[in-house]
Amino acid sequence: MSGGRSPGRDGVSIVVPVYNESATLEEFASRTLAAARSMQRPFELVLVDDGSRDGTTERLLALAAEHPREVVAVILNRNYGQHSAIMCGFAKARGEIVVTLDADLQNPPEEIPRLVAAMDEGADVVGTVRMNRQDSVFRKLASRTVNAVARKVTGVAMRDYGCMLRAYRRNVVEAMLSCREKSTFIPVLANSFARHAVEIEVAHAERAAGESKYSLFKLVNLQFDLLTSMTTTPLRLMTWFGAGIAMLGIGFGAALLALRLLAEPQWWERFSEGGVFTMFAILFVFVGFQFMAMGLLGEYLGRVFHDVRNRPRYFVHEVAGEGLSATANPRFEAARFTPTEADLASESSTTTP
Ligand code: UDP
Ligand code: MG
């Protein structure tokens, strides 16, 4: 697809969200840099520190100081979550091809050249399937449901949305950056802009050190991000579900009335005595469902609230290293705006609403 090998057209940006990964950071950086150098084309490694508190920040800054042409360290002021950190990395990245992966060495950095090769063959998005993934039946069923919904919404069939070792073309990255919603699930978002998405199989390793940065709470939240970013169908299903229950209730009431009027009195007494607790049980089930439905409404409402408030998705505290960015990316600069005297002067002369 691409013609000549100029830095702008050929460059690869490797974007990595890093949160408390000091144990494996050195190994990760050396393996990733080795893999990137082996491609023999311009590249940059954009490491986004997502509010780490275990010394990761200092190590990232040291890495950027050591390899300023290859490593960019972007330090966020606090923890914003994996996907927001990747978005920040996207805004900073300057390469034509942008690769994402996790810092915990679960995605082998040695696979990066294969992803880039698949992009060179003309793909917009390259996803990966984890080969030796050992998961429970329930977990796999959940994955299959997610994939089916995602396929309906984006029109792109992919087998594995959980694996973050992925590559995106610049136009897709720009499209994602132009999306203003705060809760995003990047693989799904990317596929909605992809024209030619492919999937390759990669190895998957156990976490080398430390533990998953996803607590149960964060994991549930991420699943809701995935759901709400894809579809509002659950809201509609609730209406249907409620209507179904209401119909059942009406039928049940009518049956009780008929029993009362038609059945033998002593039969009715026996029924109503034993029936009270059954009624409670049924009632509790429905009350439970109602609360769940309200919770689901709340998940959507909360996200709408965040988007209406329109605060920045992240705030960059510090940047070290240059990478490919001889020229600054206006989108990235906008997120770390610090007014200069010239800005202040021009602001007073123009009236912005
Ligand atoms: N991560 C992050 N911010 C977070 C949680 C995770 O930047 O709030 C990073 C983390 O450092 C890693 C990647 O996202 O590079 C995936 O996280 P993790 O390995 O904990 O997730 P899992 O593999 O358990 O899904
Ligand atoms: Mg992991």
Image (cartoon, rainbow, N blue to C red):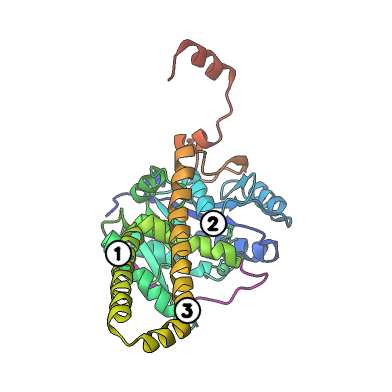
User: Which mark's residue is nearer the viewer, 3 or 1?
Assistant: 3
What amino acid is found at the position of numbered circle 2 in the picture? Gln
- Highlighted magenta segment, given as a residue range: 196-212
Q: Quadrant of residue 235?
A: bottom left
Which residue occupies 54% across, 57% down?
82
Residue 296 drawn at (x, y percent): 44, 59
Instruction: Count residues near mark 3 (Cα–Cα under 10 Å), then give few for <14, some for 14-19, many for 20+.
Output: few
Q: Quadrant of residue 54?
A: bottom right
Q: Is residue 197 magenta?
A: yes
Residue 138 vertical placement versus 16 (above, below):
below
Q: Are marks 2 and 3 in contact (CB under 8 Å)?
A: no
Q: What number is the disc on residue 82?
A: 2
The quadrant in which the N terminus is found is bottom left
Mark 3–mark 1 distance (CA, rounded to whole Å): 24 Å
Q: Earlier in the sequence, mark 2 or mark 3?
A: 2
Q: Main secondary structure of the magenta part?
A: loop
The quadrant in which the C terminus is found is top left
Residue 83 vertical placement versus 306 (above, below):
below
Mark 2–mark 3 distance (CA, rounded to whole Å): 50 Å
What amino acid is found at the position of numbered circle 3 in the picture? Val
Answer whether residue 40 is visible to the viewer in this image: no
SS class, disc 3: helix
What amino acid is found at the position of numbered circle 1 in the picture? Ala
Q: Earlier in the sequence, mark 3 or mark 1?
A: 1
Residue 234 drawn at (x, y percent): 35, 62
Pick whichever, 329 or 190, lies toward us.
190
